[in-house]
Image (cartoon, coloured by chain):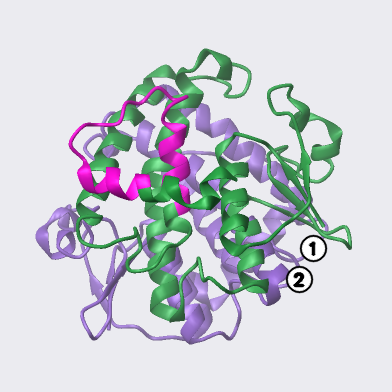
Chain colours: A purple, B green
Amino acid sequence: MKLYDGGKAPNPRRVRIFLAEKGLDVPLKPVDMGAMEHRGEEIGCRNPFRELPVLELDDGKVICESVAICRYFEELHPEPALFGEGAFGKAEVEMWQRRVEHRLFMPVAAVFRHLHPAMKEWEVPQVPEWGNANRPKAIAFLEFLDTVLGERPYIAGENHSIADITAFVSMQFMKPARIEMPEGLNNLQRWYEKQAARPSAQA
Amino acid sequence: MKLYDGGKAPNPRRVRIFLAEKGLDVPLKPVDMGAMEHRGEEIGCRNPFRELPVLELDDGKVICESVAICRYFEELHPEPALFGEGAFGKAEVEMWQRRVEHRLFMPVAAVFRHLHPAMKEWEVPQVPEWGNANRPKAIAFLEFLDTVLGERPYIAGENHSIADITAFVSMQFMKPARIEMPEGLNNLQRWYEKQAARPSAQA
């Protein structure tokens, strides 16, 4: 088994954090996204969309899409449960994971991809107006999360989950996207510092 | 239990199709999205984002997000499996579901929301350039799906799954989004007609 890894980019990062939380050690094959190596044939023949990460199993089968890779490992190694437990618990994590992806992760990515000069070749066409429209969406969700985290320790409730990993990676991605963290979101800040202090945050 | 339903909109529709595939009869509470009823307090106190559908359980707990609602029912009623079976099967469905969502469902929605005059109050600000940028993305994915469906009966492989439901609903959503189906995609057309002939397509 090997994981074609993309370094600092947010999707490769959330898979590595997920694996660290599970205590799993999967051999990594580094792919230099800065040098556009993921656009080459080594990745292209495994993922038609030439995105990272890509997991290749020992029998040659391939899983793309970060959350699909995480779910594969969740099924094989259920503890600690990062996609929730029981029908309602799993639905709750899925609900929060989707909220974080659609209202924070994707808006931050849109700001980065549509406004950052380095993204000109990656996002064609860049639509700066769309990038700008996403900044307030991301901020509004951070404010919402601050309220949520005033009532419970983790985003989806009492337990740490993939929704926390996605939110943590999204917030770190705000720096290259040049979105400033709003002041006064103390619950969110406290949660962020706890996430950053987990050993998995170094992955 | 009751499902606050939003009629013809694509997310309410994919949950109803999912339930029909499972053979489940969940009481529906219709909400008139045309009359903006989903922006009122009945939905607002259950879903802060005022979107449909919303599932309310008998104990008052609430699940939002269409795929989270589907997953809840998958856990309670595993047959027929619409999220895949086994670790690799589940990962494969998740991979295809995400590809369809990100590369078809969301692009079609972006065309509709950013270009349709009726969406002015729903999508603020409308960014027509972003709407236009999404039309070729949707078309490119349809062409890709046509190749995939030349090799197997369903999007994620040998079995019908939620990825097929999401793709079917997305393609029906192309009509209000005013995206014309490209000609010559015969595999895709054959798959679409088989989906449309399933009893669940009437849900």
Residue B52, image x, y percentages: 68, 41
Q: Is residue B182 above or below residue B75?
A: above
Residue A56, image x, y percentages: 26, 76
A133, A45: nearer the viewer? A45
Residue marked by disc 1: A152
Residue marked by disc 2: A158
Q: Which picture quadrant has residue B18?
A: bottom right
Mark 1 chain: A
Q: Looking at the image, which residue is at 87% across and 61% down? A: B58
Q: Which picture quadrant has residue B168?
A: top left
Mark 2, other Cα within 10 Å: few <14 / some 14–19 / many ≥20:
few
Give the quadrant of the N terminus of chain B: bottom right
Q: Is residue A126 above or below residue A157?
A: above
Amino acid at dot 1: Arg
Q: Secondary structure at mark 2?
A: loop
Residue A181 in view, yes or no: no
Is residue B48 on the magenta stretch? Answer: no
Mark 1, other Cα within 10 Å: few <14 / some 14–19 / many ≥20:
some
Amino acid at dot 2: Glu
Distance of label 1 from label 2 (alpha carbons): 6 Å
Q: Looking at the image, which residue is at 45% across and 18% down? A: B115
Q: Looking at the image, which residue is at 23% across and 70% down? A: A30
A147, B164: nearer the viewer? B164
Q: Is residue B195 above or below residue A113?
A: below
Contact? badges 1 and 2 (CB < 8 Å):
yes
Q: Is residue A46 above or below residue B180?
A: below
Q: Looking at the image, which residue is at 78% across and 51% down? A: B27
Residue A32 in view, yes or no: yes
Give the quadrant of the C terminus of chain B: top right
Q: Is residue A114 left or right of residue B11?
A: left
Residue range highlighted in magenta: B165-193
Is residue B167 on the magenta stretch? Answer: yes
